[in-house]
Amino acid sequence: MNHEILALIFTLLSGLCAFTVFLWKKLVRPTQEFMTDYKDVKNSIEIIRGEMVTNGGTSIKDAVNFLRNSCERIEKNQIVLDQRSKASLHYHDEALFELDNKGRICWYNKRFREFTKENGRVEEGYDWISIVEEDNREDFLKELTSCVSMCRKIDIETISMNGCKIHFVGYPYRISDDVHEGFLIHLYEEK
């Protein structure tokens, strides 16, 4: 009977050890790993929470809203400045016009309209090039295209459609050395 009791106790101990190992592998170890991961996640959340407050003590959302409001004010001020400069140039005594970064006319003043009225409608796109006499137009376009693409000053003398010597002088609105957003050009007749 001793052997049977010892075998039974050995079997029970073996089962208990196997059950303990099973619980360790399937429950305790994953729980420990989860707790370690949980601590890492909690630490990461604390770091993110710390980063969500700017140095001024407000939240990132407040900072973004402030930045958006500042950008809106800057945009409104820029629109007003643009309109103010156009208004001041509109009644200027010199014929002025503006080209976009592709060379299309996008604005002109009253004097430019008076100066070009004999040359037809030059109010949009590339129509303004019709001011230049057809025989000189190809050379004019080469020089103009070069100035626009190279972001450099326009200084071109040519002949108008009514046979007068005309001069185009313009400066790019430079963003950088090789990028611009158009030109302001002064057009006058050579005497």
Image (spheres, rainbow, N blue to C red):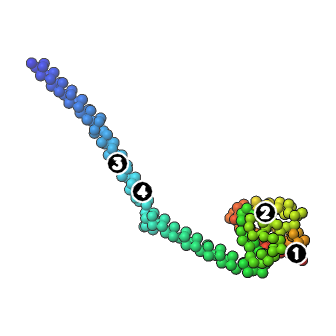
Horizontal placement of 82 versus 68: left or right? right
Where does the image place residue 77, in percent across and percent down from the top left? Answer: 59, 74
Helix, strand or loop under label 3: helix
Q: Indicate the amino acid at tag 4.
A: Ile
Q: Of residues 80 and 121, which is closer to you in this image?
A: 121
Q: Nearer the viewer, mark 2 or mark 1?
A: 1
Instruction: Give me the residue at 86% from left, 61% from top.
Output: 139
Identify the image quadrant of the C terminus. Answer: bottom right
Mark 1 nearby-residue class (10 Å; few <14, some 14–19, many ≥20):
few
Residue 19 vertical position relative to residue 168 in the rendered view, above or below: above
89 above or below 182? below
**N-terminal of the two: label 3 or label 1?**
3
Give the residue number, with chain letter if any, for mark 4.
Answer: 48
At 78% from the left edge and 69% from the top edge, which residue is drawn?
A: 122
Residue at position x 65%, y 76% in the image: 83
The answer to whether residue 15 is above or below residue 83 is: above
- Counting residues from the start of the chain, the first of labels 2 and 3 encountered is 3
Pointers 4 and 3 in contact (C-beta within 8 Å): no
| Front-most of residues 162 and 56 | 162
Say which mark, if any, is on residue 38: 3
- Residue type highlighted by circle 1: Glu
Q: Nearer the viewer, mark 4 or mark 1?
A: 1
Q: CA distance from mark 4 to mark 1?
A: 68 Å
Q: For mark 1, what is the residue?
A: 190
Dot 3 amino acid type:
Tyr
For image coordinates 83% across by 74% down, the residue present is 118
**Alpha carbon separation for disc pair 3 and 1:** 82 Å
Q: Are marks 3 and 1 in contact (CB under 8 Å)?
A: no
Question: Element at badge 2?
Answer: helix
